[in-house]
Each structure stands twice: as C-alpha cells, then as structure tokens.
Amino acid sequence: MGYGDGLENRFRASERGFESHPLRQSVVMHLKRQNHIMEKYLKPTATIDSDNPSIKERAHNIVRGKREITDKAKSLFYWVRDEIKYNPFLAMEALENFRASRTLERGQGFCIEKAAVLAAFARAVGIPARLHFADIRNYLVSDKLLKVMNTNLFSYHGYTELYIKEKWVKATPAFDLKMCHKNRIIPVEFDGQNDAILNTHNLDGKLHIEYVKDHGYREDVPVDEILAAWEKDYGLEAQQERLNRLIESGKAKGKVQC
C-alpha cells in the first residue's frame, strides 16, 4: 500500500462518526494540506525521473512480494547502495549526468546521483522521497581523489529522505559494500525506520566523516545551485583538468582510474 492509499483511508476514517463534530472540518483540511504537500514528493522531476520505464520496472522488481513499507524501503536502499558502484570520478557539469535513469543505466555514480536513484525508486512504488544536502569533511579521502578535489571538503553531499510511518527518515546509499570492505569503512545500514547517515569513524576508530553545514532538503537535484557552490569551492574548470590528467595517467599505466 502506498502513501496515497493510506491517506485516502485516513480521510474516510476521519469522516465516519465525526460528521457533526466541530473539529471535523479542521481535521479534514489538515489531512488535505498534508496530502498536497506530500504529492510533490511522489511526482517525477527532471532528475528524479520516477516515471522512466527502467526505473519503474527495476523498483517494482526489487519490492516484489513485500507488503510493509519498511521492507520496501530497506530493499530499495540496499539495492542502490550495493548494485550501483560508488564512483566520484564522473562528469558532473550537466543535468543529464544527475538523472536517476542515467545513473541506473551506467551502474555507477557518486553520492548525489545514487541518492536520486533511491528517491526515484521510492516514488515509483508510492513512497514519498526527497533529497537532502550537506557539506561534509572526509578525513580519510584517498590521495587519488584529493588530487582532484584539492580539499577534503565535499560540498553538497547528497542523501535521500523517505517518508515512512509519519516521519522523514534519512538514508545514505553512497558507499557500496565492496568499496567499504576495501577501505575499512563502516557500511551504512538501514532498517527502514531510523536515520542512516555516514559514520563518523572507520573500522580502525579513525575520524572519517564530519557534517559541517546543512543545506536543507529539495524535491529535485538543484543542479545550478550545486554547480555554483562547486565553482566557488573547487573551481570546476581546474578540477576537470586535474581529473582528466588523472584519467590519462591511469590509461598510460594500462588501467583506467575510477
């Protein structure tokens, strides 16, 4: 049962035996306002293209046989976390690169792109979803990525928020399990009910992630806003040049860096 079906049942329940109660109108109006607010978190957008056939088919296959919303949310989270490889070395200057269906097709992406896929999956199966952004510091960033970034500050790190059982729950599918095991990172686990964000320390107890600035939530990826922040923090042209040199260096050694 999706969010819309549940709300319709609540409408009906609010009306039964309550027709003449003075609070009836205010209760019904509150539910209608809530429904209006939630509707936008169920609709497709430019990057969270939950109406895309490949997104819809994959999402419904993942949750097939599951009835509880928490079980559906967990299944979607773990699929995105582990089946889409975390790769921060991707082109990021165009809206098309952030689109959920595009990320699904290529099978890899960085935090924002993977968060958009999870949001698209959720909306496709009737779970309201939105994106949240924050600046974080990664104190264990790899030397390879540090050469591209020139800083350990990750501006506009993105994760998903899912509306489950009357509350918004954070879900961060960025780091896949294989990548975590390789780098001794504690994987993010999600139970469908409690917030799941990046862990502050790694398996060795070393400081890993610090959340330093919150940018709030959005119903879609604010591409222009993010690119403006990245231009300010990194200098996109210079960053792209450093990334190109890294890729060419990898090719010269007989392997593609990723």
Image (cartoon, rainbow, N blue to C red):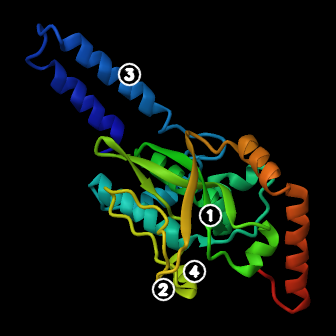
What's under tag 2, amino acid-wise? Asp
The amino acid at mark 4 is Met
Q: Position of residue 229 (x, y in %)?
A: 75, 47
Q: Position of residue 140 (x, y in %)?
A: 62, 77
Residue 223 vertical position relative to residue 76 in the rendered view, above or below? above
Which callout, 3 or 4, points at the residue further toward the start of the chain?
3
Image-based side of 181 in relation to 243, left or right: left
Where disc 1 sits, the SS reads strand
State the mark number for residue 137: 1
Residue type of the residue flagged with mark 3? Arg
Image disc number at residue 179: 4
Q: Which mark is residue 33?
A: 3
| Amino acid identity at mark 1 | Arg
How many other residues sit within 10 Å of disc 2, few (<14), some (14-19) or many (≥20)? Answer: few
> Residue shown at 75%/41% (left/top)?
224
Secondary structure category for the residue under label 3: helix
Residue under label 2: 204
Q: Is the residue marked by circle 1 packed among few (<14), some (14-19), or many (20+) residues within 10 Å?
A: some
Q: Quadrant of the C terminus?
A: bottom right
Earlier-in-chain disc, 3 versus 2: 3
Q: Residues within 10 Å of mark 3 (few under 14, many from 20)?
A: few
Q: Secondary structure at mark 4?
A: helix
Local secondary structure at mark 2: loop
- Which of the two residues, 66 or 34, is positioned nearer the viewer here? 34
